[in-house]
Each structure stands twice: as structure tokens, then as C-alpha cells.
Image (spheres, helix red, strand yellow):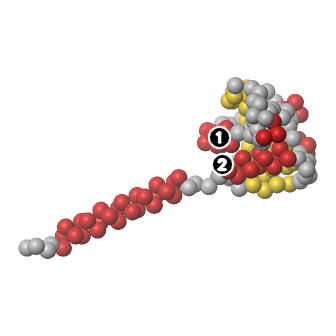
């Protein structure tokens, strides 16, 4: 017999299974990141550049142009780790020009007993502080993991 429905059904089944696997794979890859709530000064250009960095990395961002001192205190970031903007992402505080890759790592690892991450000050070469206005200069810096007791340790170094 030249035509057999069974092999055709087998091919169709294999094709459907393949399509289903692709859909599941793309669904897992497209998992959404949590909303980033960012408190900043309304006229801060480097904050806007950092927000653009987050968006380019897949984060959705909600901004509050009210300054960040109250948010920093409310989220538990000690003043010594301060910078020009503060964010809350996935239940963690993010202070300053923290790279999006480090935020994603934090969300994936989900450590307990920590407040979040900080890049104190305004380090040239960090995300948001790396535009043409800085002439391509880069300063070494550390991303700090801030513990609930106010202590910290280096989470990631950039040299």
C-alpha cells in the first residue's frame, strides 16, 4: 500500500510535539521581570540614563520624581551607601548605578537576610554614568550586597 494513515499520523504527532516544545521553551525564556520602582530627582540626567539601561535589559520601570532620601530610608539602605536614585525591584532595594545583570543575578539567587544592592556615589563608567559626557572614562567600582544589619560585602567587582 502506497498510502498509510499511521505514518502520517506519526509525523503530525511529532510535528505537534515539536511545536509544543518550542512554545514551552519560548514561554520560559520570556518570563517577565518584576517592575522596577525608581525614586529620583526630576532633573537628574544620569538617573534617566540608568532607567534606560534597565529598560534595555527588559525591566518595566515606574518612576517617582520626588527625590530618593525617603525611599532609601524606607527600604533600609544605610545613608553611607547612598547615591542619586533608589529602586525597589522584586522586594529588594537597589541603590545607585547597579548594573542590570547584577540585579537579575540577585533576583535569581534570592538571598535571605539582605536589603539589596548598592553602588555608593556616582561612579563614572557605571550604567547611567557611562555616556559621551564622560569621554569613555571608567573608574573601578564594587556592587555591594547590603545585609539587614547594615553591613555589606562585595557582590561584584568591576575593574
Quarter of the picture holding the C terminus: top right
Which sits in the foreground, 110 or 129? 129
Give yes or no for contact between labels 1 and 2 (Cβ–Cβ under 8 Å): yes
Q: Dot 1, how many residues are within 10 Å of its Cα: few (below 14), some (14-19), or many (20+)?
A: few
Q: In this view, does 81 lie to the left or right of 136?
A: right
Q: Dot 2, how many residues are within 10 Å of its Cα: few (below 14), some (14-19), or many (20+)?
A: some
Q: Is residue 55 left or right of residue 14?
A: right
Image point 67% across, 38% down: which residue? Answer: 102
Whether residue 37 appears in this view of the structure is yes
Name the disc covering residue 147, or none.
Answer: none
Residue receiving disc 2: 57
Residue receiving disc 1: 101
Image point 78% across, 47% down: which residue? Answer: 49
Which sits in the foreground, 69 or 54? 54
- Residue 142 falls in image quadrant: top right
Whether residue 88 appears in this view of the structure is no
Q: In this view, does 87 lie to the left or right of 57?
A: right
Residue 94: give x, y in percent of width and height: 77, 41
Residue 30: give x, y in percent of width and height: 56, 55
Image point 40% across, 58% down: which residue? Answer: 21
Quarter of the picture holding the N terminus: bottom left
Tell me the element at label 1: helix
- Residue 77 falls in image quadrant: top right
Image point 77% across, 41% down: which residue? Answer: 131
Residue 53: give x, y in percent of width and height: 72, 47
| Residue at far left of view | 1
Residue 155: give x, y in percent of width and height: 69, 30
Mark earlier in primary sequence (1, 2): 2
Q: Is residue 20 left or right of residue 64?
A: left
Amino acid at each position: 500500500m502506497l498510502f498509510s494513515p499511521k505514518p502520517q499520523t506519526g509525523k503530525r504527532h511529532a510535528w505537534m510535539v515539536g511545536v509544543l516544545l518550542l512554545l514551552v521553551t519560548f514561554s520560559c525564556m520570556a518570563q517577565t521581570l518584576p517592575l522596577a520602582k525608581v525614586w529620583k530627582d526630576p532633573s537628574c540626567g544620569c538617573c534617566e540614563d540608568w532607567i534606560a539601561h534597565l529598560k534595555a535589559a527588559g525591566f518595566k520601570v515606574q518612576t517617582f520624581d520626588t527625590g530618593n532620601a525617603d525611599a532609601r530610608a524606607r527600604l533600609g539602605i544605610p545613608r553611607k551607601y547612598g547615591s542619586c536614585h533608589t529602586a525597589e525591584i522584586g522586594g529588594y532595594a537597589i541603590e545607585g548605578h547597579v548594573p542590570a545583570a547584577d540585579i537579575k543575578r540577585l533576583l535569581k539567587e534570592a538571598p535571605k537576610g539582605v536589603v539589596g544592592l548598592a553602588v555608593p556615589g556616582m561612579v563614572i563608567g557605571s550604567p547611567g554614568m557611562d555616556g559621551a559626557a564622560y569621554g569613555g572614562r571608567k573608574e573601578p567600582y564594587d556592587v555591594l550586597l547590603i545585609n539587614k544589619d547594615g553591613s555589606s560585602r562585595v557582590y561584584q567587582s568591576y575593574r
